[in-house]
Each structure stands twice: as structure tokens, then as C-alpha cells.
Image (cartoon, helix red, strand yellow):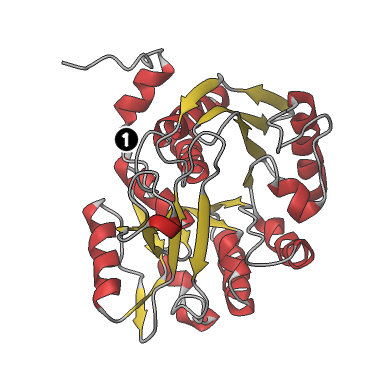
Amino acid sequence: MSKVVTFGEIMMRLATPGYVRFVQANSFEVSYAGAEANVAVSLASFGVPAAFVTKLPNNEFGLAVLRTLRQYGVDTSFIKFAEGRLGIYFLETGFSQRPSKVIYDRANSVFALSKPEDYDWDKIFENASWFHFTGITPALSDNLAQACLQAVQKAKEKGLTVSCDLNYRAKLWSPQKANQVMSQLVKYVDILFANEEDAEKVFGIKADESNVQEGKLSLKGYEQVARRLREQFGFKMVAITLRESITANVNGWSGVLLVNDEFLVSKHYTIYIVDRVGAGDSFAAGLIYGLINNMKPQEALEFAVAASCLKHTIIGDFNQVSVDEVLSLMKGGGAGRVQR
């Protein structure tokens, strides 16, 4: 099986223990995470060869990241090192009516300061069949936007499938800048991932009869969104995760997929959340896994939604589940009985 390549920033995650608030905390739990790294770890856990491309600081934190990725079987041979700092994000986990909060400290990280010439895409894409990135990476700097453009152009030249998760982050760039940059990048994208808000924030395409803040989602509205995205940019597939926020720790979860003019809808799950960060990345990894393994589109969608459903039950950004666990949930094994 040829490899999947992902490209982006990995950060130190400092989470308050349990449901402790930032203002209460006197300790933090350390792990490492980033959207594209999360996808690579999920794929490696599913047995798919996955390489993660980034730049790390030449210090103990960079070494800790490298060891973490290798622990999960991710190919780290294309990671660069330089003097600088590792980006950080702080997480406060919400509960009931109190939402979770994230604070970023990632400005001028060694990755954000990297240059397009740091990445030899001809070499990186040897023996690769798939390239995945998200809208977070080009949002970090103009240089990284250029690096992403070079990557997708080279990927298409070499015949790779290219996927992108819009992953709009208001703290990184404005809707206007996101539209300007992403409109150029998605010309080379085959499969687009998005959530309830991304298409509206980046491309001004809004689902009718939906209100994300109130947890009201319209399947008809998101079918319109998916079709408009495909009509505007020519995507082969558009996948959208649908989250109904009942409280901070109780959500409805499902997904839809537009492929071959057919609009597919997944099973709906009611989930009780342990940690929701990284759920969209686990959905993307699940769909990539299904498509690489020649699942029919409906089955691949169900695999992606089940995988991301399980992610909500796992602390940390990485979706540490097996293919068999995902398949078990797809077959109805979601009652939570002890496995003996």
C-alpha cells in the first residue's frame, strides 16, 4: 500500500486536568497534537503507511514530538529541524452549559517561520498516493501558503489524490484572507472536508434552515452547500461533519458525503464527550482509510463517522482506536458492555 503524506504544524498541548478551569489550574497535562499530525496518527493506527511533514525545534521538545510520532508508527523521515520554538495550545475542557476553551501560543513557531524551499516535494511524494493538508497550514504565514501551493501542484503533477479540510480558524486569519488563499489551493483538491461553519466562513456558502449556535442542522441545507462547493470548484467528493451541540459534553454527530451526484447520509450518534478536539481529523482519516481500501462510498462514510464518534471518548487529539473497534461500532456494538 502506497503512503499518505500530511503537512502541517504539531504543537504541545497543555490541558487542564479533568474539568479544571484555566484560572484554577496549577498543573497541565502534556501531549502533542496538530490537525495533520492527528490524521497521520489515525491512519498509521489503521495500518496505512503515513508520513507527516513539518519543521520542529532543535531541542528536547522537538525530540519529544519525534518520539511521540514514531511511537504510533508515523514516518518522520521528512521532518526538518531548526532553531526556534514549538507552538503551544492550552485546553480547558467544558462541561454541561460551559463550553471548552482553547488559547493558542503559536506565533513565530519554527514551523510558522519555515520557507517553501524547506520542502522537497519531489522526494517527499516518492511512493505516495495521497496528500492531505488543512486550511490551518496556509493560515500560519504567506510562506506556508506558498509551500501548500507548491505541494498541491506537485501532487497533482504526480497523480496523487489531494484532500483538504477547510478547518477555518478565526484566530489565525480573516474570512477575506481565507477566501483569497483557499480559493487558489482548492483548485487542486479532489476531496474537500468541512464542518457546519467552514464553508460559510471561507466561501460564503451557508446552509439554509440551520443554526449552528442553536444546534439546528438541516440535511437539505447541507446538501445545497455540498453541491454548490462542487459546482464552484469541481471537487470529486465533498464530506461534511454535522455536530448538534446539545451541551458541551452531549452532542449529536453524523456526516454527509456528496459523490457522483449522490448525497449520502450517515447513521446518527448521540455522543457523551470525553474530549472532542481532533474529531474532525479522525473523520478525515476514517474516510481516507475507507476510500484507500476500496470501500463503497456509503461504507467509507459510515467508517469515518464511527471512527470520529469513538474519538470523542478518548483523551488527547489522537484517535487511538483500531479498525476492528470501528467496524464493531458500525455493526451496532455501541452499548458499552465490558469486552471479556
Which residue in the rendered view is the most extreme toward the front? Answer: 24
Residue located at (37% from left, 22% from top): 327
Q: Which residue is label 1 attached to?
A: 321
Give x and y (percent) for residue 313: 38, 33
Give x and y (percent) for residue 89: 45, 63
Q: Quadrant of residue 255?
A: top right
Give x and y (percent) for residue 13: 38, 60
Image quarter (top left, top right, bottom left or bottom right) of the N terminus? top left
Q: Looking at the picture, tell me which residue is in the foreground, 202 or 300.
A: 202
Q: Quadrant of residue 55?
A: bottom left
Residue located at (59% from left, 79% from top): 143
Q: Is residue 151 above or below residue 315?
A: below
Q: Is residue 5 visible?
A: no
Q: Quadrant of residue 168?
A: bottom right
Q: Is residue 42 visible?
A: yes
Q: Is residue 32 above or below residue 253?
A: below
* Disc 1 secondary structure class: loop
Which residue in the rendered view is the most extreme toward the left? Answer: 340
Residue located at (45% from left, 46% from top): 93
Query: Mark 1, residues whose alpha carbon is within 10 Å: few (<14), some, or many (≥20)?
Result: some
Residue 274 relative to residue 268: left or right: left
Residue 288 relative to residue 263: left or right: left
Q: Is residue 122 above or below residue 241?
A: below
Residue located at (51% from left, 42% from top): 284
Q: Looking at the picture, tell me which residue is in the foreground, 2 or 170.
A: 170
Q: Looking at the picture, tell me which residue is in the foreground, 310 or 47.
A: 310
Image quarter (top left, top right, bottom left or bottom right) of the C terminus? top left
Three-letter amino acid code of the residue under disc 1: Val
Q: Looking at the picture, tell me which residue is in the foreground, 43 or 179.
A: 179
Residue 179 relative to residue 4: left or right: right
Give x and y (percent) for residue 170: 67, 60
Q: How many marks?
A: 1
